[in-house]
Amino acid sequence: MLIYITEPNEIHNSAKEILIRNGHKVIEAEPLLEDKKKVEAIFIRTYTTVNNSLLTDFPRLKFILRAGVGLDNIDTDLCKKKGIQILNSPGANANSVAEYVVCIMIMMLRHIGEQNKLLTEHKWRDKNHQGEDLKGRVIGLVGCGFIGKLLADKLQGFEVKKILGYDPFIDEETMAKNHIVKADLETILETSDIISLHLPLLKETKDIISLTQLKKMKKNSYIINTSRGGIINEEDLIYVLRENLIAGAALDVFENEPKINKNFLNLKNIFLTPHIAGYTKEADIMMSIAPVKRFLEAVK
């Protein structure tokens, strides 16, 4: 089968090698018009949009391999109509993201960024930025799938006071097995010291956290987003941070990547990273290999 890898630098070589060993031909340069008619699978990651325009260019397409979890860059309804199977890698980067969130929780509570800046300015520690322990905090998880469950497990070693979870698709008993107390979104917003978002970007989740929700948070609380930029309304978040209505936020994802809203750069109570929560060497390999394994099973 002829497979076109649209983002070759984003797909780990081990995944390409597996495809070749199993008799498939892999191309990385954009195929010529005649070759596009022969391509039966495309392998994408983050920056390829699968829409009608792309699918029209590849009339024999049967499979889309996605090195990642979310499908917001794929028109899934159109693929279904055309009988194109989508194979992604759910859970492949869950550990990396969960570790990142724990790291960011501690960095925000201890004001690591501010204290580091003081030293670079040849100043010593500032009591105004004295940190707090993660122990004894109430953690709120919005979305309790692969990453949410794993994060809850990791937080047990830090002796947090309670982990609240909002997820309409997971029952109370299942959450309890993962040390999570099922709660509604309003309760999580009003009582959590730190809220971490783990949702796919859908019509139902777009701007699920906007000004109304942010104003319900405690003034000394923090919010972390490692899911998708559109989950939080960015202008509303900038407003509440600028007005110090919450203690701070950490964002690893943005509505427009890589061109982020410049107003974030002027805030002192925000921690920004360039979509790296699940971007570790281990996760990179897993996210590339997982859809390939599923593809080989499907072809079989």
Image (tube, grey):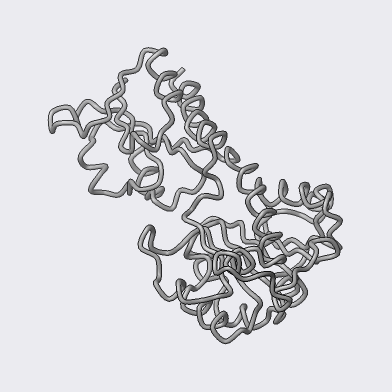
Residues 96 and 227: in front is 96
Q: Residue at x 86, y 64 (%)?
A: 136
- Left or right for 197, reference 14: right
Of all residues, the one furthest to the front in this rendering is: 122
Image location (x, y in percent) of residue 233: 49, 73
Q: Position of residue 45 (x, y in %)?
A: 40, 41
For residue 280, above or below residue 274: above
Left or right of residue 292, residue 33 in this image: left
All told, the count of numbered labels is 0
Of residues 139 and 206, the one nearer the viewer is: 139
Q: Residue at x 74, y 77 (%)?
A: 190
Q: Place residue 181 in its image quadrant.
A: bottom right
Query: Compared to 68, does 293 lie above or below?
Result: above
Residue 67 place in picture, x, y as percent: 45, 38
Quadrant location, the N terminus? top left
Q: In the image, residue 285 lies at what x, y percent?
A: 51, 31
Most extreme residue toward the bottom is 243
Query: Where is 22 relative to 69, above or below?
Result: above
Residue under the image location 84 percent in, 61 percent down: 135
Depth check, front residue: 132 or 169: 132
